[in-house]
Image (cartoon, rainbow, N blue to C red):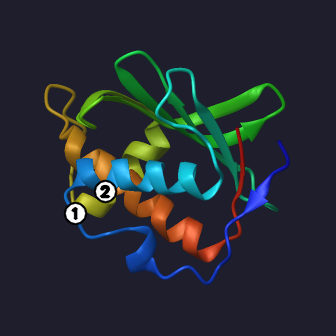
Amino acid sequence: MRPTEIPASIPEAEVFPDRNTRQAWQSFVEQLAAKFHIDFTRVGAQMFVDIPGSIFRLIVQKGNGCIAIAYGTRMDYGLLPDIEIIFDVGWAPLEVRYSDEFWQQFAFSQSILSKNESYIDYEALAAHVLDKLKKEILLNQWRVTS
């Protein structure tokens, strides 16, 4: 499939309705999939989203009972992720893996002083990732392939 670009003129309200984190993630992925005619209702569906002229890539994959999101640096072999989030089918974050640099960006944005491994607010971290993606997708021309 040939990469497709999102026009920079899409209004934020149209692409990203104001809802809670779970609904916002679901809406984000469903609208990207619909825009580029990717059947994201089927198990095994996937999207590779690149920012032209940038090293960043978003990968979204639908498994059996889960949705996996990975975001990071595009590499020849795929992706060096800064963050990976596994959601259940209701878009609740089940598992999160992140780089130290990504954690520091998140912690700074949330005014967190230290990394407490015993409790990490997955919902807040997922919301932070989505906010970051929303800003980048509106500021840049993204290409999507399936």
Q: Taking 132 as reference, is 118 above or below it?
A: above
Q: Is residue 44 left or right of residue 117?
A: right
Circle 1 sits on which residue?
19
Q: Quadrant of residue 115?
A: top left
Q: Is residue 92 left or right of residue 37?
A: left
Nearest the viewer among 140 and 10 is: 10
- Residue 123: x and y in percent read 21, 44
SS assignment at label 1 = loop
Name the residue nearer the viewer: 17 or 94: 17
Quadrant assignment, res 38: top right
Residue found 41% across the figure and 15% down from its top: 64
Identify the residue at the far top of this view.
64
Q: Quadrant of residue 58?
A: top right
For label 2, the SS is helix
Image location (x, y in percent) of residue 112: 21, 53
- The residue type indicated by label 2 comes to Ala
Residue type indicated by callout 1:
Arg
Quadrant containing the N terminus is top right
Residue 137 screen position, x and y as percent = 57, 66
Quadrant (top left/top right/bottom left/bottom right) for the C terminus: top right
What is the distance, in whole Å, between disc 1 and disc 2 at their CAs? 5 Å
Q: Is residue 115 visible?
A: yes
Between 142 and 123, the one nearer to me in the picture: 142
Task: Report if the CB atoms under discs 1 and 2 are less than 8 Å apart.
Answer: yes
Residue drawn 23% across and 35% down? 92
**In this rendering, would 47 be left or right of 19?**
right
Q: Which residue is mark 2?
A: 24
